[in-house]
Image (cartoon, rainbow, N blue to C red):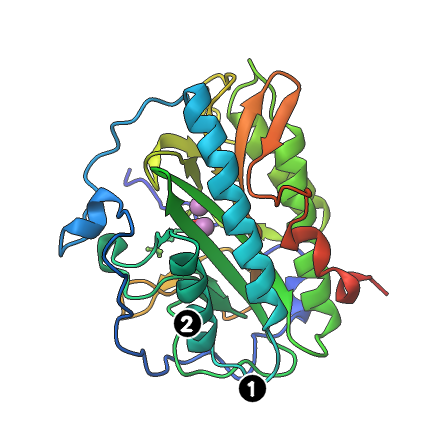
Amino acid sequence: MAKRKRRPAAPAGAARIPASDPPVRPGLVSPRRPVPRGIDRPPYALDPSGDPGRPTSAPVRTPAELEAMARTGALAAEILIRACERVAPGVATDSLDRFVHDAAVAAGAYPSPLGYRGFPKSVCTSVNEVICHGIPDSRKLADGDIVNIDVTVYREGVHGDTSVTVMVGDVDEHSRRLVAETRAALYAGIEAVRPGAPVSDIGRAIETRAGRAGLGVVREFIGHGVGTEFHAGLQIPHYYDRFADTALAEAMTFTIEPMLTLGAPQVEIWDDQWTAVTRDGRRTAQFEHTLACAAGGAQILTATPAGECAHDLFLDALTLS
Ligand code: MF3
Ligand code: CO
Ligand code: CO
């Protein structure tokens, strides 16, 4: 018998939730922003194809690499906070790209998305039903939108990768719940990190949390090893996968970045070959941190030296009524 492709159903209760309206449409993408000579580029950025090749780095970092990752992660966290502060109705996602690009370069960092596998911009901005990899363009944020801003920077030979979904003005109740629960799902995943535990513990924690909230979990995009490479070999599913049996170990570095959906977690890709949207057009949210597995559990690398991150700073609108 032919194997049927597994089609996760929409969560119970989703029928009451309408598709995001109006749908997001592609806007105009501005010309590629230059990176000054003198900024150290990741290897893929030296190749016009942006092909990073197959991951080759070790799953664990050296002590010096871990220190560099804390500094680069802090920079990513700082830029993400400042990008979120600029979010308002009428702001084009391209202007968020300009801000992130200029902030990275000013700090002596390379904006990792730029040129990665041909990605044309320096940050991903994913609005409403866009799951991830949204390309910043001329579309202006509107009152009621939700937008994920995903910042990755490369400095001292290592990447820091972090994202949050923030609300634009007055956002409907379903979307507020989606954003709050997706943030909580990230932290549920982070809580599951401990040396010796299988990677599958992370996805199980996230899936359980999402299921209780009646939300779908996207399966096509997963967390990843990160360090000297943007996407290293380690894979971190956000659902329970019994084959994800790699044992976590101290000094492993990776992301957790769940994408949760109000409806079915089915993915469709736009003709630009990047923008991933939900098939049913219902909204989706994502939160991401770069982490190191430490003796006592996860260490969040994408926080400022004061321990701040956008994940904690833009919560006012998240109070559930
Ligand atoms: N930052 C994304 C992640 O979390 C990857 C973006 S790849 C890009 O893995 F090319 F779209 F930038
Ligand atoms: Co990532
Ligand atoms: Co990211």
Identity of the residue drawn at 37% across and 65% down: 275
Dot 1 alpha-carbon crowd within 10 angstroms: few under 14, some 14 to 19, many 20 or more = few
Q: What residue type is labelled 2?
A: Arg
Provide residue 196's location: percent of width, then percent of height: 55, 13
* Res. 283 in view: no
Q: Is residue 301 visible?
A: yes
Residue 210 placement, left or right of 121: right
> Vertically, is 199 above or below 27?
above
**x 56%, y 76%: residue:** 20
Residue nearest the observer in this picture, 66 or 234: 66
Task: Write down the quadrant of residue 86 in the picture.
Answer: bottom right
Q: Which mark is residue 218?
A: none
Q: Which of marks 2 and 1 is nearer the N terminus?
A: 1
Residue 210 placement, left or right of 268? right
Q: Position of residue 295 (x, y in %)?
A: 61, 16
Q: Residues within 10 Å of mark 2 (few under 14, many from 20)?
A: some
Disc 1, SS: loop
Q: Does the residue labelled 1 lie within 8 Å of ligand 1?
A: no
Residue carrying label 1: 90
Amino acid marked by disc 1: Gly
Which residue is drawn at the image coordinates 63% and 65% (left, top)?
A: 166
Q: In which quarter of the image is residue 167?
A: bottom right
Residue denoted by label 2: 98
Q: Is residue 283 left or right of residue 61?
A: right
Q: Nearer the viewer, residue 44 or 215?
A: 44
Residue lying farthest to the top in this orientation: 196
Q: Quadrant of the N terminus?
A: top left
